[in-house]
Image (tube, rainbow, N blue to C red):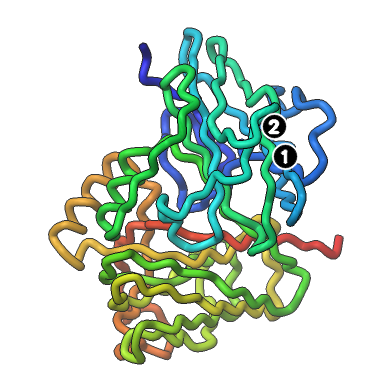
Amino acid sequence: MTDKKLFIRNYLGQTPDSLTTNGVYNSPDIICSGDTPIGNPHQITGKDAYENGTPDLNDQVPAEKNYVYVRGLNPTNSKLESTIFLFYCKPSVILWPQNWKNAGIGYKGNQEQNGVHVIASENEITSTKHPYKWELNVESIPYSLIVWPFADAGKNDPLLLPEPKTLAEMSNFLLDNPELAIKSTIEVDSSQPTIHETVPIVGPAEGGILNIGVVCKGIPPGGYLQFSVQGPDPANSINFPKTLIPIVGYTPTIQVKWSAGFDSTMEISYWKEDTTPPDGASLNPIVGFMESSSDENKKLIDRAKTEAPNQLAKSHFYGSPENLNKSTDSLDSVPIQTLYLLGMIAYVLKDMSR
């Protein structure tokens, strides 16, 4: 039996030859149409729809039965059988698999089924023939949606999820399973002069050294960024001041020591001032680690350079909260460090006044 799996993208433009993310988990192949099913499900498997990422839906309706479709590409020249598992998780910068849920997900007549067997002809774009039916509770929206395809034909048994407890274990899980597809994006209205968001950060069960920051993806220079994180103690709390965004791709990061089992939130603010962010630009809160932290981290980053180079980012490293340089008139004194991205949430800017 082939070990090939249905190819499900993490971002528009991703190909089967590059089973890595580009740091943004916005799968165009996880389609949530809210409490109304898509009129003609075949519209999601046409070539144009696949290439354009349409329909682009992440409509989640609390206390209702939501409809979720998953599509994918058979990247082989022969028939391919896969089983697609769907999970959801409360938003967090790191989506630890032990927090993924499948309660309330059903398929066809089965009230509790999150694994669906799919057969695809050679090079075929296909999808789950029927939508998953997901009973969405009202704890928070939108949830992050996760899809995990397997090559095991007919594997509809419940899937036992791993429980990584350290950043290194989570990193190896992501590197070992590049076929994971995730939709963890939230649209925000860029027509507003100021954007404020509260971002959950679920930390590693065993704690560790975390690098926390924001990727200003596609954000033009001239606006301002500010963020803060309440850490386990004052020495490991972050207060990044209101700072001019000097370049496209600005990625300020601060290093903190996280206590075991500690969770927190990031408060992030963006002022666009006289700039006009393009639709699709995003503010991406991130958590990761740097190779300089330990030999183990260096080995993981060396592995990522070969297997998942797009999971690495060049960050502007401001050091510890104590050493945070509050002057950003020049980036010359801010060292560039290679950061392995363990996770992020993308707040995608869209002008909703049009």
Circle 2 sits in a helix, a strand or a loop, which is it?
loop
Q: Residue at x 46, y 85 (%)?
A: 240
Q: Quadrant of the C terminus?
A: bottom right
Q: Residue at x 50, y 67 (%)?
A: 285
Outermost residue to the top: 78
Question: To which residue does mark 1 refer?
Answer: 67
| Observer-nearest of 199 and 281 | 199
Q: Label 1 neighbourhood size at 10 Å, few (<14), some (14-19), many (20+)?
A: many
Where 247 falls versus 52 (above or below)?
below
Q: Label 2 neighbourhood size at 10 Å, few (<14), some (14-19), many (20+)?
A: many
Q: Residue at x 42, y 29 (%)?
A: 17
**Residue flagged by tag 2: what amino acid is it?**
Pro
Residue 193: percent from left, percent from top: 74, 78
Q: Which mark is residue 11?
A: none
Residue 70 sits in quarter: top right
Residue 110: percent from left, percent from top: 64, 30
Q: Which mark is residue 131?
A: 2
Where 322 falls versus 21 (above or below)?
below
| Observer-nearest of 189 and 315 | 189
Residue 278: percent from left, percent from top: 68, 60
Q: Is there any visible trace of residue 337 in the rendered image?
A: yes
Report the Cα–Cα distance between label 2 and label 1. Answer: 6 Å
| Observer-nearest of 344 and 101 | 101
Q: Is there any visible trace of residue 329 in the rendered image?
A: no
Task: Check if mark 2's residue and mark 1's residue have beta carbons within 8 Å.
Answer: yes
Circle 1 sits in a helix, a strand or a loop, which is it?
strand
Q: Is residue 255 left or right of residue 265?
A: left
Q: Is residue 203 left or right of residue 268?
A: left
Residue 91 sits in quarter: bottom right
Residue 9: percent from left, percent from top: 53, 36
